[in-house]
Amino acid sequence: MAGLWRSYQALMAKHPWTVQIITAGSLVGVGDVISQQLIERRGLANHSVRRTAKMMSIGFFFVGPVVGGWYKVLDKLVTGGTGGAALKKMLVDQVGFAPCFLGAFLGISGALNGLTVEQNVTKLKRDYMDALISNYYLWPPVQIANFYFIPLHHSRALIQQRWRFKGVTGKRTYRTCLCNTIGCCSDCGCCLELLPLLESQ
């Protein structure tokens, strides 16, 4: 395990952009597998490979490049490694970046799941504020620790989890979704909420 970690660090030092994108896409895919198997309990026979592939593509082409680029910009906007600098980075990240990123992610996810522009707008109006509020329950303290303890080249938004829970109450969300399926969608994903963005090194 230590050897694998050293190899990963060496690759990160040589090819940070490529490794970041591959890592983000892979872990977004892992997150969807965890969601389907442990949260939704669909079983391997009913696993939606198509949905996992869509989520991985969002990780490869959106999450990895956008978040990686943002962290570089943020590191230039707020310099220093003190606790105060970490607090400032968290505030800029959560006030300026998180709301835009969340809206873009939900919109891209809806488009990949075949929603029309009108359906996507309806979905954003319905889900955006719940997802944003839930984001603020979790991410400010996590981001302070991230910015204070983890070097820039290891700071990555690696995993996109989509939990079918409303906020942080632990209650399942049951709605009539835009594909006219009662309850939580299994294939189109249009009523899944983005919770949460998990980061690790």
Image (cartoon, rainbow, N blue to C red):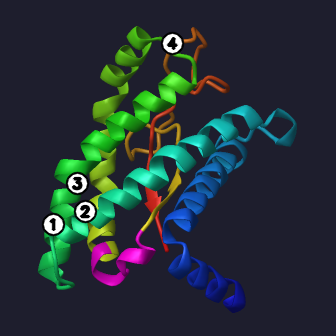
Q: Nearer the viewer, mark 2 or mark 4?
A: 2
Q: Secondary structure at mark 2?
A: helix
Disc ID at residue 64: none
Q: Quadrant of the N terminus?
A: bottom right
Q: Earlier in the sequence, mark 3 or mark 2?
A: 2
- Residue 144 at what x, y percent from top left? 26, 71
Q: Earlier in the sequence, mark 4 or mark 3?
A: 3
The residue located at (31%, 64%) in the rendering is 71
Q: Is residue 190 visible?
A: no
Distance Cα–Cα, label 3 vs label 2? 14 Å
The residue located at (51%, 12%) in the rendering is 178
Q: Which residue is mark 2?
A: 73
Distance Cα–Cα, label 4 vs label 3? 29 Å
- Residue 18 at what x, y percent from top left? 56, 63
Please name the amino acid that badge 1 sits on.
Leu
Q: Is residue 101 visible?
A: yes
Q: Which residue is mark 4?
A: 178
Q: Which residue is mark 1?
A: 77
Please name the amino acid that badge 2 sits on.
Val
Q: Secondary structure at mark 1?
A: helix
The residue located at (32%, 31%) in the rendering is 128
Distance Cα–Cα, label 2 vs label 1? 6 Å
Marks 4,1: beta carbons within 8 A: no
Magenta stretch, residue numbers: 147-155
Q: Earlier in the sequence, mark 1 or mark 3?
A: 1
Disc ID at residue 94: 3
- Residue 58 at what x, y percent from top left? 54, 42
Distance Cα–Cα, label 4 vs label 1? 40 Å
